[in-house]
Image (spheres, helix red, strand yellow):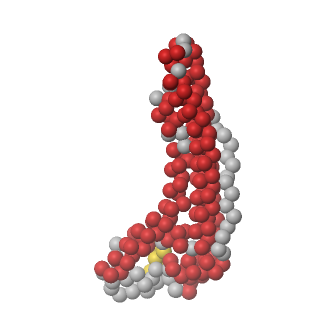
Amino acid sequence: MTSHKMRSAPIAVAVLLAIGSIGNVLAAEDAAKSQAQTQGLGGPEIPGVCLLSRQAIFANAEVGKSASAQIAKLTEESQTEFEGQRKPLEDEARKLEGEKALMPAAKYTEQQQSLARRWGELQKKADHRTREIEATRQKAIDRISTEAQPVLADVYKERKCGLLLDRGVALGGNMNGDLTAAVVKALDAKIKTIPVQREILPMTPVASSGR
């Protein structure tokens, strides 16, 4: 059980490696869906009805790409940090197992419990870092949304929109009312990057699992 836990130590942080690419995946799926919709149904353009994909804005605007790259770097740095702390514990666990037959049962149990406690502390730190990077990602999204809002308002007025819908909920039809590309272009002209620093959150007590 101890060695299994050691192998999974940085999993919480490793999962974050996918965060930076989520927007790109969603945007790619959204773009493919929109292309299929446009080719499949078409129809007359509905005056005043406009569409927007927030995921595509985050993924394709320069400021979104910059933020994703910075978050990916923070994540990789955290992964490296926790891998460095995990390996000595794994080595110690293997050594302890190899010496089990040569030491008294009480001593083996004592060292095993000490190792388990240190593993638990590392896992708590990894979980905490995961929360910090997620908070960092959310703060970046909020900042980009704030920067994009007046740009969207300008494009909305320019296109004489009367109703704005999420592009992802459109099952088909004429997509000429899609504002996404225009908003991305205008946002790129306004801002290309934002500083992203890891959020530092207070450590919160974690209830014992009883194991």
Query: In the shown orientation, is residue 82 left or right of residue 41?
Result: right
Depth check: 39 or 87 in front? 87
Residue 146, above or below 6: below
Identify the residue shown where x is 62% and y is 39%: 85
In x, y percent, where is residue 149?
A: 60, 73
Residue 128 visible to the viewer = no
Query: In the shown orientation, is residue 27 left or right of residue 40?
Result: right
Residue at the left extreme, as displayed: 40
Residue 19 visible to the viewer = yes
Residue 13, above or below 169: above
In x, y percent, where is residue 45?
A: 39, 86
Residue 179, above or below 197: below
In x, y percent, where is residue 30?
A: 42, 70
Identify the residue shown where x is 53% and y is 21%: 99
Identify the residue shown where x is 45% and y is 82%: 177
> Which image quadrant for residue 108?
top right
> Which image quadrant for residue 104?
top right
Q: How many marks?
A: 0
Identify the residue shown where x is 63% and y is 61%: 70
In x, y percent, where is residue 117?
A: 59, 28
